[in-house]
Amino acid sequence: MTTNTTNTTAKNTTATDVTAGAAPRLDYAKSARNAFRALIGFDAAAREGVDPALVELIQIRASHLNHCAYCLHLHTNDARKAGESEDRLHMIPVWREARHFFTAREQAALALTEAVTLVADGGVPDAVYAEAATHFDDTELAHVLALILTINTWNRIALATAKQAGTDNR
């Protein structure tokens, strides 16, 4: 059994975004300002030249896989604001069974998102990578990979700091 030894009196620890009765978790943006800013910069650079709808599909799928309710709430709302349909949003977790909702390019990005997000389950299969490479040039593929890396990092920060869905300030 693991014992939670979080110091709840440390001045960098706040009681934001925790479930009732849980020990407070730190505010990552305040406690690691430079790392947080660097991640924001990496995220912004990753998005350059990528269709905003594809950005959201990648972020939503990774957030599903990582069970990150905070990021899932944030990115489904962002997708809706950008004009994404409810039908497509509902089909993202089961995109393989609902391929007709997504273009071949989007399917390749979703498959790559799954492989990179679940990399410990067997790496990134050559076939998945090759399929993505047929739909994206090297620069686009690098940006898609960067998007997958950033959302996985955001998911892990949100989960580690117990961010609660619906509490974002956007």
Image (cartoon, grey):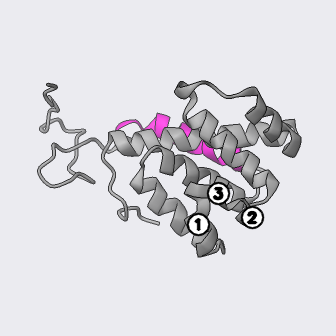
In this image, 122 relative to 34: left or right? right
Q: Residue at x 81, y 43 (%)?
A: 140
Q: Could you say whether the residue bearing mark 1 is in a helix, strand or loop?
A: helix
Instruction: Name which residue type carries label 1.
Output: Leu
Q: In this rendering, which labeled residue sits more in front, label 1 or label 3?
A: 3
x and y percent of residue 160 in the render?
A: 34, 39
Tell me the amino acid under the disc marked 2. Answer: His
Residue 24 placed where, x, y %?
Answer: 19, 44
Q: Secondary structure at mark 3?
A: helix
Magenta-span inclusion, residue 36 = yes
The alpha-carbon separation of the residues under discs 1 and 2 comes to 13 Å
Looking at the rendered structure, the kind of residue marked 3 is Glu
> Picture coordinates of residue 90 (x, y %)?
55, 67
Above or below, comparing residue 167 to residue 141 in the picture: below
The residue to which callout 3 is attached is: 97
* Magenta-tinted stretch: 29-47
Marks 3 and 2 sit apart, C-alpha to C-alpha, by 9 Å
Mark closer to the observer (1, 2): 2
Q: Does residue 104 show up?
A: yes
Q: Residue at x 53, y 64 (%)?
A: 76
